[in-house]
Image: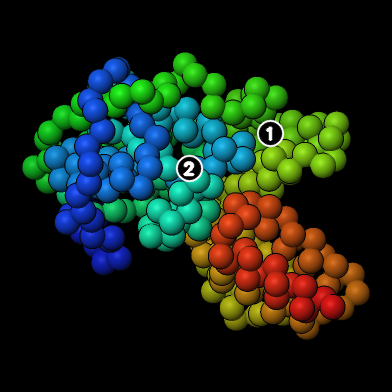
Amino acid sequence: MTDKNFSRPGAVDLSNIAGATPEAEGSSYAMNVTEAEFEWAAGESVRYPVIMIFHSPRDTAGSGVVNVLTKLANEAAGKWLLAKVDVDKYPQIAQAMRIQAVPTVVALLGGQAMPLFQGTRDEKDIAALMKQVEQAAVASGITGRAKPAAGQQTDDEPQTDPRFKAADEALAKGDYEAALKEFDKLIEANPRDAEAKAGKAQTGLLARTADVDPECIEKADADPQDIGLAFVAADVELATGQAGKAFDRLLGLIKTNYGDDREKIRVRLLELFETLPPNNEDLKKARRELSLALF
């Protein structure tokens, strides 16, 4: 990453946003942001980098990323500030930033917002990425220091249900198979556990998209009736924030297939639905269209 990345077409211009400033007390460089604090954080990005993570407390797969970023923010001691946005509490912020999947990590730098990554990464990869952001900031002349935020959670405070600890640890190591087994144990113990189901679905998506053909979408578009190609393309689209396209692709197949094939597509759609918060607009639209297609 270089400073050039932060000015390419598609960046969200935030340089004119201003808002109330939180008190600078305490010793944590990670903060949970409300709408007012989001505006302040966006404005501060002209002074130092602001790393923003959009997450959901229901997203067990993403809790490890929140914890790692909180730790790295405190270790950086002001080189950048971590701003955590709970998309369940503040869906309007996620909508304004065009966030369609959690967790999503975005860098605010010099008045612009650029996506860094979605899904889980191990600590080594995230730390390397943060170093690149720091270097891009210096290259752009952004050399200010953040002050510690008041009253925010630190990495010493639990952020998720402890029953997901084993799955979170496996995800932090990139061991998707082990994480899936842990979620299966939870679901077996309680088949109605919505959080465990969401965690399993998100982990499955991450596992399937870890090593895919970069031309998978092009291939699926060239042969729209191939269910296998469509599944891979939909996974990639969902993982890259194109939930609407992913759902439309599989909904189109639902309408042209019957019997076992239709059931297989329906099951995959329901699994992909589990990866998004229930208030996601693409999800709500796709649920309605699936009901119409089936009945």
**Residue under circle 1?**
179
Residue at (53% x, 31% y) in the render: 64
- Is label 2 or label 1 in front? 2
**Residue under circle 2?**
86
Left or right of 94? Residue 88 is right
Q: Amino acid at mark 1?
A: Ala
* Quadrant assignment for the C terminus: bottom right
Query: Looking at the picture, does residue 131 appear above or below residue 18?
Result: above
* Residue 124 seen anywhere in this rendered image of the structure: no
Check disc 2: other Cα within 10 Å, few if <14, some if 14-19, many if 20+: many
Foreground residue, 220 or 154?
154
Q: Residue pushed farthest right?
A: 259
| Secondary element type, mark 1 | helix
Picture coordinates of residue 148, whole percent (x, y):
26, 24
Query: Looking at the picture, does residue 238 appear above or below residue 275?
Result: below
Q: Quadrant of residue 264?
A: bottom right
Residue at (68% x, 33% y) in the render: 179
Picture coordinates of residue 32, whole percent (x, y):
40, 35
> Which colour style is shown?
rainbow
Q: Amino acid at mark 2?
A: Asp
